[in-house]
Amino acid sequence: MEFKHKPVLLEECIEGLNIKEDGIYVDGTLGGAGHSKEIVKRLSKNGLLIGIDRDEEALAEAKRKLSGYNNVKYIYGNHDDIKQILKDLNIEKVDGILLDLGVSSYQLDEKQRGFSYIGENELDMRMDRTQQLTAKTVVNTYKEERLANLIYEYGEEKFSRIIAKNICMYRKQCEIETTKQLVEIIEKSIPKSKQKDGHPAKRTFQAIRIEVNNEIQPLENTISDCIEVLDSKGRLCVITFHSLEDRAVKNVFNKAKGICTCPKDLPYCVCGAKEIGKVINKKPIVASEEERNENTRSKSAKLRIFEKI
């Protein structure tokens, strides 16, 4: 299948990075290289782009698309490990980092990967296909309460309890192996009158994907690490697609710009708030109406930008 991925908020990201032609930039979510291609275009032969992805198929496609450029390093890994990755490259500071936390169109559309609720395929949902935890494991082994909590928290699904209950009842009879089986359980769990806001399985599939790929828990540490490795005037651009992701990014940005997070009743600050940079956009940048119409996956996208002192 051809690797298709239309980069979200492309112009806004390029402007936000404030690219210097001889600078060092990191695309921590390389994907189909949609953003990276525009970054590397703006670099001189002395500039460097580091592309990181934990999906080997994405890396292979990025190498193909960027084959005309000699100043790109491709890293099979996770942006959560950015400090170690840069250390291994003997790079101390960089001029800009981009994190696009969304799943690529290719991953969603490639039915065999199990991300999609359309069709019938094995429950997988791994971005890194070498890891052990899969969607099948989550659905068939997690206790009912844990399932319900993750579907509610990560999917913001108000019918999470009944969905989890029905999953557990179904798997007593036989293992849930395919996306079609899971979709049928979800559809039976949500009243028909409430199935008007997109596909009824969308939120549950999102929740399981986030759990499988551990997309939320390490995020605040990752954002902090990204800020730490920025050079003076370096910028971090983060695109989120989920309220939990956006909240984590906002929290770290606020702390990094020196906002005290202590309870108001304390007589003095104990959190050690220290200003190390500034937030470029007070409110997150969202896609234009034109982009939302052209690319439905941009509808929930939010871009926040931070600049190191």
Image (spheres, rainbow, N blue to C red):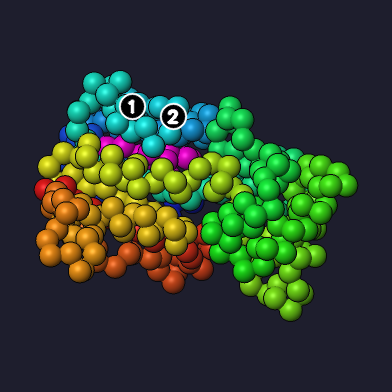
Residue 30 colored in magenta in the image:
yes
Which residues make up the magenta segment? Answer: 25-36
Amino acid tagged 2: Gly
Picture quadrant of residue 53: top left
- Determine the residue located farthest toward the bottom in the rendered image: 193
Residue 150, given in percent of the width and then of the height, sits at 58, 54
Give the vertical position of 121 relative to 187 (above or below): above
Q: Which residue corresponds to the image point at 44% horizontal and 58% vertical from the top-left?
A: 244
**At numbered mark 2, what does the secondary structure look like: helix, strand or loop?**
loop
Give the vertical position of 251 relative to 45 (above or below): below
Residue 26, given in percent of the width and then of the height, sits at 31, 37
State which tag comes first along the sequence, 1 or 2.
2
State the residue in front, 266 or 185: 266
Instruction: List the residue tagged with mark 1.
Output: 85
State the residue in front, 168 or 258: 168
Residue 224, given in percent of the width and then of the height, sits at 28, 44
Amino acid tagged 1: Ile
Q: Which residue corresponds to the image point at 31% horizontal and 45% vertical from the top-left?
A: 223
Residue 307, given in percent of the width and then of the height, sits at 19, 51
Give the vertical position of 287 relative to 307 (above or below): below
Picture quadrant of residue 85: top left
In the image, 229: left or right of 62? left
In the image, 225: left or right of 277? right
Q: Is residue 38 visible?
A: no
Instruction: List the residue tagged with mark 2.
Output: 77
Q: Which residue corresponds to the image point at 22% horizontal and 47% vertical from the top-left?
A: 235
